[in-house]
Amino acid sequence: MAQETLDRLNEEIAFKTIVNSALHIFPKSFINRNNEIILEPRNNVYFRLDEVDTVMDFKCKMFAWLSRPIAKGLNKYWWPRVLACFNELLRTNFTKDEMYLIYDRLGNDVNRKLTVKFIESGYDMELLKR
């Protein structure tokens, strides 16, 4: 089998693994018929899985669409729970204050290049400081 085919298969397995991990870590999460992964149903925390084909795509979506609810959209009961699941899934230890900065710089997918660079750096917060 060609190396390119093996790499593609490995990426597909890694992608399915992170999606399944998200569904396991976030209680009551599911994927609906519109191909949206609903991570926290009660507060409608979700993102679309269309054009999400790699682990990097998935992580970028996590930062783009979960940073806002964690930083400022959820009440004091929900934000720590969603943040704990976020941190468990990505094996990070972000605080709420860090999520404010992440939302400011990466939220709503405003800077995909910076998001990729941030992820590839191992989540170096210095990259997000102005």
Image (tube, rainbow, N blue to C red):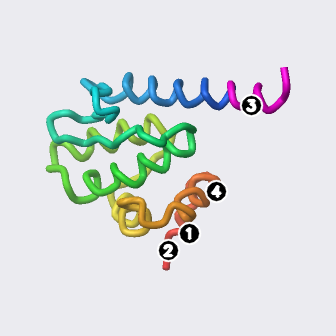
Against 116, residue 82 (above or below) is above
Q: Residue furthest right?
A: 2
Q: What amino acid type should be assigned to the residue bearing mark 4?
A: Ser
Residue 111 vertical position relative to residue 7 in the rendered view, above or below: below
Which kind of residue does numbered mark 1 sit on? Glu
Q: CA distance from mark 4 to mark 2?
A: 14 Å
What is the magenta range?
1-9
Q: Which residue is mark 2?
A: 129
Residue 4 rendering spot, x and y as whole percentages: 79, 32
- Residue ID at (34%, 32%): 35
Q: Label 1's element?
A: helix
Alpha-carbon span between mark 1 and mark 4? 10 Å
User: Looking at the rendered structure, which numbered label has been put on residue 7?
Assistant: 3
Image position of 92 (left or right of 117): left
Task: Determine the CA span between mark 3 and mark 1.
Answer: 31 Å
User: Residue visible at 30% across and 25% down?
Assistant: 30
Residue 17: image location, x then y, percent: 53, 24
Q: Residue at x 20, y 55 (%)?
A: 73
Residue 64: within the magenta?
A: no
Front disc: 3 or 1: 3
* Secondary structure, magenta segment, majority class: helix
Label 4 sits on residue: 121
The amino acid beneath tag 3 is: Asp
